[in-house]
Image: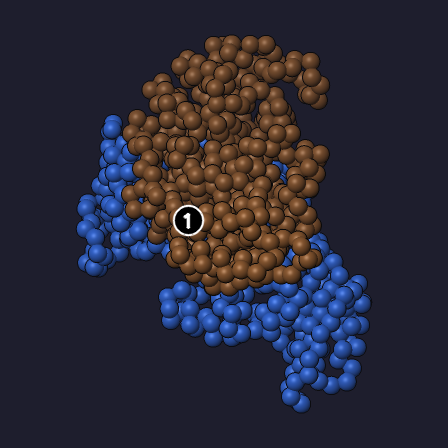
Chain colours: A brown, B blue
Amino acid sequence: MSTEFKIAIAGLGTVGSGVVKALTARGEDLSRRAGRTLRIVGVSARDAKKARGFAVTGWTDDPLSLAKGDADVVVELIGGDEGIARQLVETALDNGKHVVTANKALMAKHGKVLADLAEKRGVTLKFEAAAAGGIPIVKVLREDLIAHGVDAVKGILNGTCNYILTEMEASGRSFDDVLKEAQAKGYAEADPTLDVGGGDTAHKLALLASLAFGTAPDLDAVAVEGISHITADDIAFASEFGYRIKLLGVARKVGDAIDQKVHPTMVRRSSLLASVSGAANGVLVDAGEAGSFFFSGRGAGEAPTASAVIADIVEAAAGGGASPVFGRPAAGLEPLKRADGKAAASPWYLRFEVLDVPGVLAAIAGNLADSGVSIESMIQRGRAPGEPVAIVMITHETPQARVERALKAIGASDKVRARPCMIPMES
Amino acid sequence: MSTEFKIAIAGLGTVGSGVVKALTARGEDLSRRAGRTLRIVGVSARDAKKARGFAVTGWTDDPLSLAKGDADVVVELIGGDEGIARQLVETALDNGKHVVTANKALMAKHGKVLADLAEKRGVTLKFEAAAAGGIPIVKVLREDLIAHGVDAVKGILNGTCNYILTEMEASGRSFDDVLKEAQAKGYAEADPTLDVGGGDTAHKLALLASLAFGTAPDLDAVAVEGISHITADDIAFASEFGYRIKLLGVARKVGDAIDQKVHPTMVRRSSLLASVSGAANGVLVDAGEAGSFFFSGRGAGEAPTASAVIADIVEAAAGGGASPVFGRPAAGLEPLKRADGKAAASPWYLRFEVLDVPGVLAAIAGNLADSGVSIESMIQRGRAPGEPVAIVMITHETPQARVERALKAIGASDKVRARPCMIPMES
């Protein structure tokens, strides 16, 4: 075995602990793979005194010092798209150190600039753990499915949302109920906004889109809708129609432009994406002539995320990963040309909560007709007198903009309770 | 862009043509990824005059000359585990050239020796296309799911078998019927033995097992059973029980030993492997604490296989892939310790074709009881008088050796027609 490969780790939360444990438990095998002895030389975290169940070597209170020491690679597991995480990554790259990060927000917002810096300094910047945890989708898009181009990437990229939707389906309970339980069990954050609002999925999607299409990551171009408005009724109706509701991140080519969207989607129960249950992740890649490829597994948690971080560390140590950070040289990553996402057509699931009074259905039907939305099927179920009634419709294939126009008109009626719900369906 | 990366291609069948076409159509993008201009400098194939629909540069009648010319990488797409293919790969490596091959038989039989040679010469030997076509499972096992070890790899690795089984289920037709149709359509070879007999799957499995477990590929240690004895009845019964029959290659750890098997298996209809239909491939990897990961897509054909070959070429050009050929240094690849595969326990599907005469069932039940095989459920259906009757049984979880002992006794009876059929069921 030739020279040592020195590793500095900033951040010892769930993922950082997992990385230290795996490097300790399987260091010998991993070193054989890397062709160099892997050694942790520096560690930093918020709380020096926290009991972690493993010994820490090379402790420092100043994470930035890790970027200036003798480490060959700095592993950034602090998080956040600004502040200390960004500073650490920039300083480490600038000092000619390889960087491995799990930071999706940082890479989605500053990925191009950081990649440019890494490539100028001749070091690698790797971020496999930033999207879909243990599923090596970053490398697959960067290095494997490259010969025939990519037409679309569709992914279940947030385990918390998928866990909630899976539980809602299994138990028939409401979103709020299941969220509370998930928080109690530690599956959802105290502030769940970034997960259930779709923001986390958007970060990951922006990275996958960049890798797939050779554009600079563009988080602002992602249209984002979360899952907090999905009701137990929606889940039940989906099931009745042979579908399942999933929060998807979708990036696809539309001519020479790219459409990036995060939104709940009705996927057929027999489809591969529908098979992704609980906290798992799954990604479907349409790779042109080569066909569709599907990848699934655990997308978060200690071991799966540490698995991705360690693959990056070993590759950096082996001297591999000489390919550009986003697959193509950063200097040439073009800004993304935004497609008109609202032109996308699909059948739609629509749900209205209405007062049970004469004329409501006629008014809704009229508004839909005015916007050119035609209905394929409809379900209305009776409830207790005086209570609002759910009307559910499936449309024929219709562009999103038209459906939104109709729903705006319908939502303005005082007979319609709450915001009407619209969910695209796989056709 | 720095220096050119010179490519020599030996073999212009389906895959070779796909490689030339993709390198031609997307050469600029692929060169940007590699950081070097990719250029085909030499080509060889059996028939110089065949119309191929693309121009060929650097033609030679002597493939071996490609290993001695100025190419940086030699792409071996000739096939066969001896003869010219082996000679070409050895000569190319010996002359310090990178080698990319799709040759599963060569790698399964001589992988360790060739890897050793490549590592001694400081060049890469890549074989992504040798298993599961466009699914980058070789790289996933070699470089990605490495932090927590692998407990098992289970794969649908032969598209021809999966196509036949899928068609048998969809149409209710016999194996022979569907095979003939597949041959007429070009989905199956004129001599289908290697595919339907399980040999092709065994080659691929031996490679995946080596990558997963750090052992030398050991084709001889794979117990192989094909699909030609599967009847339309078996498929129909499987369906009735909620299962689907798939030809699986399974490699798994049993203590410090490895069990490698290829055999038809009943997988639950709701499982990920059951979702792999038609000519597709799918692989499930149990990656210890990191959990299970699933990968599926097209496993053969021009574009998917070319996709894998090109990923290898680009990685070699980028100077990546410095990691060992089988993940760990070849010199240290240990011989595999064989597990006793017949000790593996599962529920079993059993089918007997018997004469409709008194006492047959009693005799079968007696033989099963003698070997300690207990029956969970049984189906017997009437047929026309005088015709043989199918008796189908599902056993409780039982070691394979015991079921085989019972079936040997049962098969010896002159009341039992044909060889009894036994298929393990996912429990």
Q: Is residue B223 above or below residue A202?
A: below
Identity of the residue drawn at 60% across and 16% down: A45
Q: Is residue A221 above or below residue B381?
A: above
Q: In this view, does B98 lie above or below A342?
A: above
Q: Which one is in front, A209 or B426?
A: A209
Identity of the residue drawn at 40% across and 14% down: A94
Element marked by disc 1: helix
Identity of the residue drawn at 35% across and 31% down: A216
Identity of the residue drawn at 71% across and 74% down: B379
Q: From this viewpoint, is residue A336 visible?
A: yes
Residue at the bottom extreme, as displayed: B385
Q: Position of residue B291 (x, y in %)?
A: 61, 40
Q: In this view, does B390 lie above or below B239?
A: below
Q: Which one is in front, B181 or A170?
A: A170
**Residue designated by label 1:** A405
* In this picture, residue B72 sits left or right of residue B410: left
Dot 1 alpha-carbon crowd within 10 angstroms: few under 14, some 14 to 19, many 20 or more? some
Q: Where is residue B181 in the image (x, y as percent from the top left)?
A: 42, 72
Q: From this viewpoint, is residue A150 visible?
A: no
* In this picture, residue B29 sits left or right of residue B312: left
Q: Which one is in front, B111 or B142?
A: B142
Q: Which one is in front, A210 or B378?
A: A210
Q: Mark 1 lies on which chain?
A: A
- Look at the image and tell me in which quarter the C terminus of chain A lies: bottom left
